[in-house]
Structures are given as C-alpha cells and as structure tokens.
Image (cartoon, helix red, strand yellow):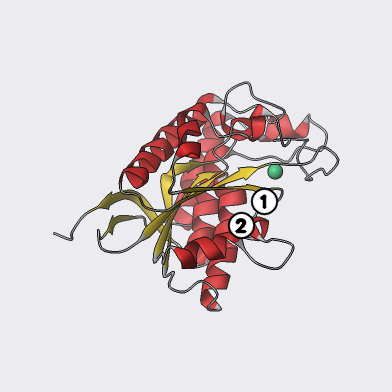
Amino acid sequence: MPVQMVSQTIELLKEELPLDQEFVLFPEDVVTGLVLVDVINGFCTVGAGNLNPTGKFRGMINESARLARLFCDKKLPVMAFLDSHQPDKPEDPYPPHCIAGTPESNLVPALRWIENETNVTIRRKDCYDGYLGSMEADGSNVFVDWVKNNQIKAILVVGVCTDICVLDFVCSTLSARNRGFLAPLKDVIVYSRACATFDVPLQIARNTKGVLPHPQEFMHHVGLYMAKERGARIANEVSFGAPK
Ligand SMILES: [Zn+2]
C-alpha cells in the first residue's frame, strides 16, 4: 500500500475508533505504582537482536526514563518486567528474542540504573503477559504481592509493545482487579506517550515468510483502544500534585 493510503487508513481508523485521552493527576497522598513493560534492548535498542528495533522507540524510552526517575525520587513502588526466554522455548509467531543471559533481555541503557534502587522490583518473564509471568510454582504471584505489600491504589503502565505485552498485562490485571484479587488497586492507567510498538509494513510482511503485517501507528492506536475497552484509563499527560 502506498504511504499516502496508509496514512488515510490511519485517519479513518482514528475517526471510527476515537480514543479520548485524559490528563491524569496523581494525588501525593495516594500510592501510585509504575509498571515498566519490556523496556529492554531486544525490543527497543537499535541494532539489538532478531527483532531489529528502529529508532522510533526513542520518545517512549525518554518518557519512561523520566517517569522512573520521578517515581524513584518519591520512593514510590516501581515494577519492571523483562522479557527473558530460554533458547529452547520459542514464542511464536516471533523469531527467537530476548534470550536470558544476553544483553537483549536487559533494560535499555537509559534505565539500567533502576536495578540499584530499593523501591524497584525486577521481574523476568518468559511470556507476553506480565501478570501470568509473575506467577510462581507455588501459586503465589509477585505482581499481586507487590500491589498488596505496597498498598498500591493506581498503576501507571508504560513500555512495549502497546498492543502485545502492555495490552495483555492490562487485560489480565483488570480481570484480576474485578475479581477482587488486587485490593486496594483501583485505577489502571496506560500512558500513551510512554508506550510504543514496532513496524512491519504490509509489503515487507508479504515478502517474508512467517511474518505478520504490523503497521506501527495503526497497532499502537488499536492497542490503546482495546485497553480502554477493558476499563483502563488512557492518559496523554500525567503529573503529581494536588488538584487545582
Ligand atoms: Zn518474548
């Protein structure tokens, strides 16, 4: 499809599926947690690994790192999911990626410092969904414990990919919240400017065996829309402070 037709299709999509985004203010007296989804080299660093990330993740990385600094300065809880796979366990339909023990499965350079912060919990996961990836063999769940131990009332979710790991985590979290597993968690907020997804244009997918088309802006929008359909709030601006 020519570039112009792609952009017309995106305009049409945004007309048919309008996404109202909001300014979200976090009150200083309520515990808000930050969840960083897969802001790791294999997905976000140019030239790293099989998924061949592009420079289009720069804005998402900068915004995620800014928020991580803000949350760490306030000693608020931060949880970081890191996609980490064993070499003999593929994750279809994607090529091998983010193999445990390689730099691909580590945080991007702009976020590596959070590993030394006492308010940060790092969770390596070998599936799309960070909620399921937090389950231990004994049935306990590292994410659920993190919410309860810190008495978190709202979470801010950022990272990649908007329509895959971010969305899956948000869907599971909202179902678990609705079933009462996550008290006192109330709000799940996805911050669109700190989320991103990858780009595989149709003409490239057609010529590459086993690769699905994945137009970036289109799928980013759909991912946010589907999160909203599950009951997430979608923010295009976030801040701390008292309401004016
Ligand atoms: Zn993976």
| Nearer to the camera, 228 or 244 | 244
Quarter where residue 101 is shown: top right
Q: Position of residue 139 (x, y in %)?
A: 70, 68
Q: Quadrant of the C terminus?
A: bottom left
Disc on res. 37: none
Q: Residue at x 36, y 39 (%)?
A: 69
Give the x, y percent position of residue 117: 44, 41
Residue sticking out furthest to the right: 88
Question: Compared to 242, does 56 lie above or below?
Answer: above
Question: Which residue appears at 72% of the width and 66% of the height?
Answer: 138
- Amino acid type for the residue under numbered disc 1: Tyr
In the structure shown, which secondary structural element does the residue marked by tag 1 occupy? loop
Which label number is shown at residue 128? Answer: 1
Judge: label 1 CB < 8 Å from ligand 1: yes
Tell me where residue 218 appears, x and y as whole percent: 54, 44
Say the numbered circle drawn on residue 168: 2
Asked if the residue at tag 1 contacts the one at tag 2, i.e. Cβ–Cβ closer than 8 Å, the answer is yes
* Residue type, mark 2 in image: Asp
Relative to 34, 242 lies left or right: left
